[in-house]
Image (cartoon, coloured by chain):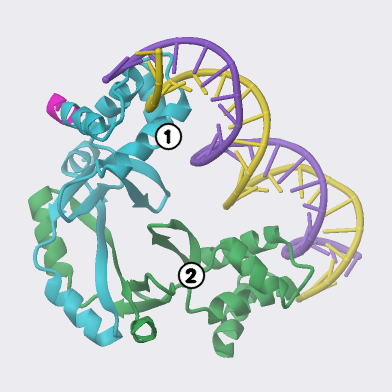
Chain colours: A cyan, B green, C purple, D yellow
Amino acid sequence: MIETSATWLTKLKANGYRVTKSRQTVVEIVANSKHALTPLELYDLARKKHTGLGLVTVYRTLEKLEELGLVQRVHQPQGCQAFITAFNGHQHMILCSNCGKVEFFAGDNLDPLFLSIGEKTGFRVLDHWLQLFGICAECQENKA
Amino acid sequence: MIETSATWLTKLKANGYRVTKSRQTVVEIVANSKHALTPLELYDLARKKHTGLGLVTVYRTLEKLEELGLVQRVHQPQGCQAFITAFNGHQHMILCSNCGKVEFFAGDNLDPLFLSIGEKTGFRVLDHWLQLFGICAECQENKA
DNA sequence: TTACTTGCAAACGTTTTGCACGATT
DNA sequence: AATCGTGCAAAACGTTTGCAAGTAA
């Protein structure tokens, strides 16, 4: 998905950020990853393409991408440091516990549920997180 | 809820752990809190009752309580270090974005949804997290 | 009495900051 | 040319570990 990378770089530029080799490398990797990546994992991958890259730059680039809504943090039992492409609109995630692959799915009609919970608890519901964990099709095959 | 504290202490003892003043203090505070507490917050609260307590002991006690399924970690946008009483069976959480209060609610019947997601994505769904965020009844009133 | 638990200090891994140099616009 | 971005080193932060002394059983 070279297209996504390009879009991200355009957005960075549009928001007054400069397009540098470091940022290009980081963007290219995150934008094309189907797995959530920690800053360190991203750093290791990125250094294969741009040896001089510093870990600090990875952190600072992720900060900007998050600010622009291009990446989001993924919460998992093992930890919450990993980032993945943010999807537009409200989407929910399903994560493979074996290989770490992340897919998004639309929320179907959960609104009635939230309404009823709101009534039961007295809360005014503003947001929600729904995440599923399981084994992806590929990993199911490979284990058989 | 003195009852909960006592139950927890009993469970600790039943699992070969000793009941000490430090553990009693930590247990009493977590078991009675309606808010998720970070180790540091818990430490500060606990030291009001037991001055000599060390932060390390808070960490180690939380570790044991988590192992025994008495507390669970709470994931929030601001961070994922806070702990709260774990409920039996699978429950979902609703959190007040204003005061941090946490309530649990039963999952209604979400299984059909998970089944349909499983079919669409090819995943074998094993677990799920559902969390709602909003403003609790009390905070709604206080803002009016 | 024995083994577990404690708190301190130190170590650790991750994330952030200060700074002079380098690169983008 | 001006400003923004970089990488290094050091600092800061939360968490874990080693250990000798203290305490529960």
The answer to whether residue B137 is above or below residue C10 is below
Q: Residue at x 34, y 37 (%)?
A: A64
Side (left or right) of A10 relative to A17: left
Vertical arrangement, residue A143 with respect to residue B144, above or below: above
Q: Count neighbours of disc 1 (C-alpha within 10 A) and say few if under 14, some if 14 to 19, many if 20 or more.
A: some
Place of residue B76 in the rendered image (x, y in percent of width and height, measured from the top left): 39, 60
Identify which amino acid the numbered label 1 is placed on: Tyr
* Side of C9 where B140 appears, left or right: left
Crowd class of label 2 (few under 14; some 14 to 19; many from 20; radius 10 Å): many
Q: Secondary structure at mark 1?
A: helix
Quickly name the residue at label 1.
A59
| Residue named by callout 2 | B36
Q: Residue at x 18, y 38 (%)?
A: A138
Q: Indicate the chain on which mark 1 is placed.
A: A
- Seen from the viewer's position, the closer of residues A4 and B81 is A4
Percent x, y of residue B51: 78, 71
Q: Does the magenta run of residues contain B117?
A: no
> Which residue is located at x 43 percent, y 72 percent?
B100
In the rendered view, does D19 fall on the left or right side of A84? Answer: right
Q: Is residue B91 visible?
A: no
> Rounded to the nearest whole Å, what is the CA distance between mark 2 and mark 1?
28 Å
In the foreground, A130 or A121: A121
Disc 2 with disc 1 on a shared chain: no
State the residue in front, B109 or B102: B102
Where's residue B88, x and y in %?
A: 40, 77
- Foreground label between 2 and 1: 1
Amino acid residing under circle 2: Ala
Q: Main secondary structure of the magenta part?
A: helix
**Magenta span:** A1-5
